[in-house]
Image (cartoon, coloured by chain):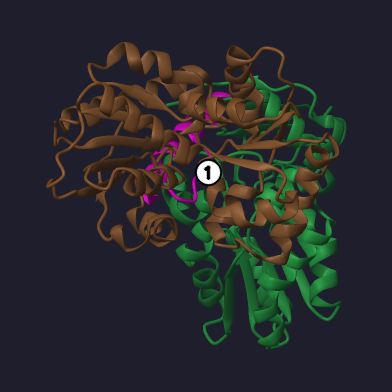
Chain colours: A brown, B green
């Protein structure tokens, strides 16, 4: 047993969906979230830069005496996960491998679809992770750059969001996709819309939920779980502009987000 | 007469609309464009950070022996224009004052509408600039966070873009707006759509065009114009990811954007 907090980080606000899944899946665990809002987005930055920023955040989280790190950022998971694992004395869990594993388990043989930001799709990280597990599986990737701003506007069910979703997802429907990986931490908030557009025969893989399950498995296997009486405590920190984080973040995790610290990095 | 280039900078790609207007308005002038793609967007960053980044870019542009600087970035114009002017021995022209001046000249007394990113609207910079010129004018501001990603997707006439534009602009139509300032360098690419949604009675103020006209006035008043035989030469530099800049930038300036240098800053 270990009541120390779990560290979670993202380039900005999207990792709060992973945090929300952790709250649901591991209600006794304390957490510390870091959103690098001063340097968001990571997608267009070079892999070396993403690794450098991720290591700076890791160092800060480790200084807060955490027992595990969740890389709740697809870009950082794609470019920095091994570097982070090399530099950490606690377990480091990314979002890509859990999502890929769940998709491979769910598919009935139809292609697996992957949607994400332009950066995540260009990195090919999900495709590689799926092929590592199942080399013959066909993967169809589509980048959906408008989904993040739609989520940040809170337009989860707006008619414009539905038009945009149809435009992005039509090629996946046409290809006979039976499983869709939501390869961006913002996308779980669009799940009802995406399910309607795709039809109920398509299984949606929520990387946030899958990552929370992976964290539970890791903590359990290392006997690092918090005790059942641990009063879960949740801290949130950002590198800039905490007001916007508060305003938009409440869409992700509700009232548990009431106070945000500013920790300048870099 | 002076054949040295004009320096232009933006946090990313949007300033290319200003560059395009400069090409049209001043066809004999050479230009050097710098897009800070490693650190885009500036909107959510603190004013002190925006000033620091802007000064680093100014220093690089001055080292290229430019004769004037165009701050083709609304956030930098809002937070850094005076600092830049203090540190520059060549004229520095921002995008906000020319747009505000044209709007005040165009309005028939109805409110002036201003649209921009969340950061520009929150800064209140256009409202202040308009009130400096005409204190009694009523200004209606609306932030339109989805317009930049729509432009970067190239969805200038997509039905989803029209739905989104109607949602954002309905309050301005209801308020009887007679003049609309496009307070973001991406928005000129949406002009035909915005004109349709607002109706032809509303005058659209394109900050890019207005800024180019202001640059012409400044060069002329200081006798800094290029000679009529000057072979205009155009350079483009970014701080990261030149491929995406090439891909998206061609929507803004066409084939004149064929080569991009990378200049890491900071």
* Stretch in magenta: B38-66
Residue at 29% in and 43% down = A26
Tag 1, which chain? Answer: B
Residue B88 shows in the view: no
Give residue B79's position: percent from left, percent from top.
44, 53
User: B102 or A52, which lies in front?
Assistant: A52
Residue B104 shows in the view: yes
Give residue B264's position: percent from left, percent from top.
51, 21
Give residue A213's position: percent from left, percent from top.
40, 35
Task: Provide the secondary structure element on which disc 1 rests.
Answer: loop
- Left or right position of A153 against A51: right
Q: What residue is disc 1 on?
A: B41
The picture quadrant where one finds residue A137 is top right
- Left or right position of A124 against A169: left
Q: Is residue B104 above or below residue A170?
A: below
Give residue B155's position: percent from left, percent from top.
80, 50
């Amino acid at each position: 047993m270990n009541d120390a907090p779990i560290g979670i980080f993202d380039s900005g606000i999207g990792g709060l969906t992973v945090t929300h899944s952790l709250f649901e899946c591991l209600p006794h665990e304390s957490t510390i979230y870091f959103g690098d809002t001063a340097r968001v987005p990571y997608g267009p930055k070079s892999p070396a830069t993403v690794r450098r920023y991720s290591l700076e955040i890791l160092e800060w989280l480790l200084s807060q005496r955490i027992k595990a790190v969740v890389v709740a950022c697809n870009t950082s998971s794609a470019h920095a996960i091994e570097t982070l694992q090399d530099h950490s004395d606690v377990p480091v869990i990314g979002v890509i491998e859990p999502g890929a594993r769940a998709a491979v388990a769910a598919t009935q043989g139809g292609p697996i679809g992957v949607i994400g930001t332009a950066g995540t799709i260009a990195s090919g990280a999900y495709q590689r992770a799926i092929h590592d597990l199942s080399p013959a599986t066909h993967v169809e990737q589509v980048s959906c750059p408008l989904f993040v701003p739609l989520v940040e506007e809170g337009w989860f069910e707006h008619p414009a969001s539905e038009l945009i979703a149809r435009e992005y997802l039509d090629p996946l429907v046409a290809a006979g996709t039976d499983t869709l990986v939501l390869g961006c931490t913002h996308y779980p908030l669009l799940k009802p819309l995406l399910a309607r557009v795709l039809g109920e025969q398509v299984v949606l893989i929520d990387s946030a939920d899958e990552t929370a399950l992976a964290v539970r498995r890791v903590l359990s296997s290392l006997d690092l779980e918090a005790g059942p009486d641990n009063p879960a405590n949740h801290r949130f920190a950002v590198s800039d502009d905490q007001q916007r984080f508060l305003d938009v973040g409440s869409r992700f995790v509700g009232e548990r987000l009431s106070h945000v610290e500013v920790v300048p990095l870099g």
